[in-house]
Image: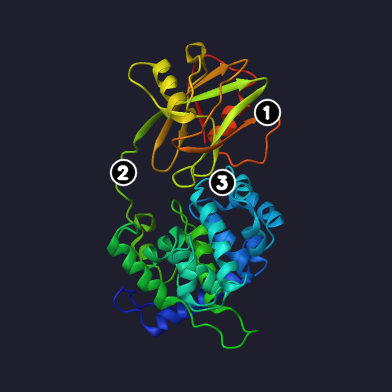
Amino acid sequence: MRPVTDTLSLSSLTPPVRDAIRGALLSWFRAGHRDLPWRRSADPYRVWVAEIMLQQTRTETVREYFDRFLARFPDVAALAAAPLDDVLALWSGLGYYGRARNLHAAAREIVARYGGRFPQDAEAVAALPGVGPYTAGAIRSIALRQRAALVDGNVARVLARLFALPLRPQEADGRRALWQLAEELVPEAPEAADADNDPGDFNQALMELGATVCLPQQPRCLLCPVSEVCLARRQGDPERYPPPRPPRQVPEVDRVTLLLCQGGQVLLLRRLPAGLWGGLWEPPTGEVDPRGPHQALQRLCQEQLGAQLPVERAQPLSPFVHLLTHRRMRFQPYRLEVAAVPPLHPQGEYDQLRWLDPSRPAALGMSAWVSGLLGRLHTPRRVCDAERTT
């Protein structure tokens, strides 16, 4: 890399500085990087699925899901033709289930509007359900070989340190500055089809650097290919950038849930498509009642099942906590064993019901808290120490 001693500034990224950063990162990335399954092909479908899965999810977690998902849905036509229940079932445990619903909706749109071929036009890519600016930039640069920038958490950290930006990426000024830098730095698209994919490789280099070298804590500056340029390193305090977001209060939400059991099976309901766990299956769940648990369960049965059940016989199980990024869910489960049930009609937040043998899990989309709760049915316990699920 050409030595760069110019002071980097947001307002003037000179061509020599820009070219030095590009050259150093491209050489470093092409010399060796992590072998990730979605990097073994530039097929737009694979890149798209991977980028959707990687949103707010650790790379190691996505590794466990990506190959299984591609084996079941090898192309966009297979994904579009599948029932949403099948898609959510393979997504179970990955979280942020709106991503799976949007992925399925976008696959159907690609088949219906583009004959199953991933669109090439920038506006068409950005208009697909679930595709935001970062995902559009990744797909266009990596799979379509177009000049398109991207900024995710790793890229934001790298750029904030390179330029010692005292701006938070979550705020409007910070987002605007980081995207401006990313757009100025990304190389031109190759003219020849067999040429190196400079925009795609450069964007992946930025992400790779943030994931493996420019870490949030204890960055490995001695291994960084652009350390000579980095203003934060010159200042001697790279962890100062980007400024941390101010602490926020995470709201706590209390819920009561009913494990209605009959003949070794448990009742599950499917949530309506929209919302936090839209389209997933769970035991009937509702709000707590200040008058007591029996009143809460009675209201739950009336509002969600359209039936009266002997909830006074329900036995409490250990409460547990399920942590989400934006809230802390506290569940109090109850188990009610019945010999017979009246006709049940899913309503309120639910649209379907089915009975499931918990010892033989079906291919249903379920959140992690539901899978963990069903696993406890064989050894139910009364209220004791709170348990934590993730």
* Residue 134, percent from left and from top: 45, 65
Q: Amino acid at mark 3?
A: Leu
Mark 2 secondary-structure assignment: loop
Mark 1 or mark 2: whose residue is earlier in sequence:
2
* Residue 354, percent from left and from top: 61, 33
Between residues 194 and 337, which one lies in front from this camera angle?
Answer: 337
Rendered image quadrant of residue 357: top right
Residue indicated by mark 1? 357
Residue drawn where x is 58% and y is 78% of the image: 197
Q: Is residue 216 visible?
A: yes
Between residues 296 and 36, which one lies in front from this camera angle?
Answer: 296
Q: Tell me if residue 179 comes above or below residue 69 in the rendering.
A: below
* Residue 224, percent from left and from top: 50, 65
Mark 3 or mark 2: whose residue is earlier in sequence:
3
The label on residue 341 is none
Q: Tell me if residue 342 comes above or below residue 246 in the rendering.
A: above
- In the rendered image, the residue lying farthest to the bottom is 191
Q: Tell me if residue 304 comes above or below residue 34 in the rendering.
A: above
**Do tag 1 and tag 3 residues touch (Cβ < 8 Å)?**
no
Side (left or right) of 244 relative to 139: left
Mark 1 secondary-structure assignment: loop
Distance CA(mark 3)–CA(mark 2): 26 Å
Between residues 284 and 375, which one lies in front from this camera angle?
Answer: 284
**Do tag 3 and tag 2 residues touch (Cβ < 8 Å)?**
no
Residue drawn where x is 28% and y is 64% of the image: 173
Q: Amino acid at mark 2?
A: Pro
- In the rendered image, the residue lying farthest to the front is 343
Residue indicated by mark 2? 247
